[in-house]
Amino acid sequence: MRATCHRTVQRAEQELTALSRSIHAEPELAFAEHRSAAKIAELMRSHGFDLRLPVAGLDTAFVAEYGTGDLVVGVCAEYDALPEVGHACGHNIIAAAGAGAALALAAVADDLGITVRLIGTPAEETGGGKVLMLERGVFDDVALAMMVHPGPEEVCRPGSLAITDLEVRYSGRAAHAAAAPDLGVNAADAITVAQVAIGLLRQHLEPRQMVHGIVTAGGAAPNIVPAATAAVYNLRAAESHSLQRLENRIRACFEAGATATGCTAEVVQVSPVYAELDTDEWLSEAYRAAITELGREPLDRSAERDRVIGSTDMGNVTRRLPAIHPMIAVDCGSAVNHQAEFAAACASPSADRAVVDAAVAMAWTAVAAATDPDQRVRLLAAVQGRPGASTEEFFASGGVA
């Protein structure tokens, strides 16, 4: 079955790399990935997968399914891009590798007694597509979930930080900046005070807490006292309780801006909270064996403990069911994710190799789990003990549980 998976990916290599390059060439932002989702969906439909698009009340989310086995193997595909730098996080590789793994597993689905489910998950960079799909039942009967993310290094079990995105909006009163400044209430000053407070707070942050933000609205003209300003901040922490403590302190900094200037402040949560990764050890080791057999050299277990990859909504999936989120290396020089140079590397021969190797490694990981009697029992038992709607109920409801 492993050999069949490998041959299947090799036969589909041209289709998969063409898919990766095509998604890369037309980057689309969160919840607007219409072309990208359609490209993946059409490829799966052409290979005999049953397709549902949209699902979970999300226009660019989909499920492509093959087989009827009791063990449901979920493969997650991401395909949203970043503003300005496009696919600088390599989600085109994630999507194509996920499609390849699903094709490989479909070729052995009957022998393995599995159902293969390629899950198209939009809005990872912001918006929390997977969180919404978890809440709406898409993962309820999934026994294990997988995805592989590109990066500068090969890391089988990376860590991540919990994250919440907050937007603060200040409202003041406009006035002529020279003729009647005393009549104005300066919303730009409110942001300045908040930024200073946050800057001073950094000295006292807990280990692995992080704060970074941008001003998204700062005023219209220098001769008008700004009446409305806004900023968006990412708050990150090693785990969810630490994140909540950090959020409380940052909200106090936002309030300080309002108090000092006489403005009003509104704080809005932009995306669902992303939990930190808690990937499955057995599946991670099965992936490590697979990717090593394919000739790659992942970091050893002691080194990868310090590799934190930022934040991902896959963290929420790993806390609901057994799942993995390894990193696969692409040749990118000194570049890192979210840089334009990394975007260029994600449409290269090295990126194409990553698509193929990741697809095979995920397929072999699923084969290992499905053919190990103890693991199969463990995975199926976890599904039975998980609250939530059944697949039949979910899809009967039109994909919104």
Image (cartoon, helix red, strand yellow):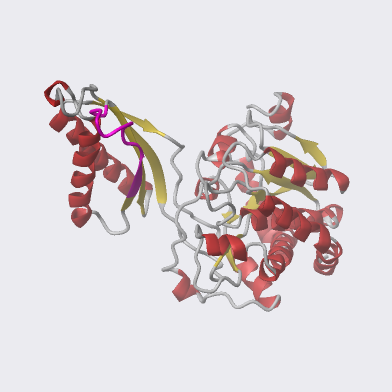
Percent position of residue 63, x then y:
72, 40
- In the rendered image, which quarter is residue 204 located in? bottom left
Percent position of residue 111, x then y:
85, 56
Can you say whether 39 is above or below 399 in the image? below
Q: Residue at x 81, y 63 (%)?
A: 13
Percent position of residue 47, x then y:
87, 49
Query: Considering the image in quadrants, where does the C terminus appear?
Result: top right
Q: Is residue 362 magenta?
A: no
Q: Residue furthest left?
A: 182
Decide if residue 189 is on the left or right side of residue 139.
left
Q: Nearer the viewer, residue 251 or 17?
A: 17
Q: Nearer the viewer, residue 124 or 169?
A: 169
Q: Nearer the viewer, residue 221 or 285?
A: 221
- In the rendered image, which quarter is residue 132 located in? top right
Q: Residue at x 83, y 65 (%)?
A: 1
Residue 45 visible somewhere in the drawing: yes
- In the rendered image, which quarter is residue 136 located in? top right
Percent position of residue 389, x then y:
64, 31
Total labels: the figure holds 0
Q: Residue at x 72, y 57 (%)?
A: 21
Q: Residue at x 53, y 60 (%)?
A: 340
Decide if residue 105 is on the left or right side of residue 315.
right
Look at the image and give the residue range highlighted in magenta: 212-226
Q: Main secondary structure of the magenta part?
A: loop
Residue 169 visible somewhere in the drawing: no
Can you say whether 314 is above or below 135 in the image? below
Decide if residue 246 is on the left or right side of residue 232.
left
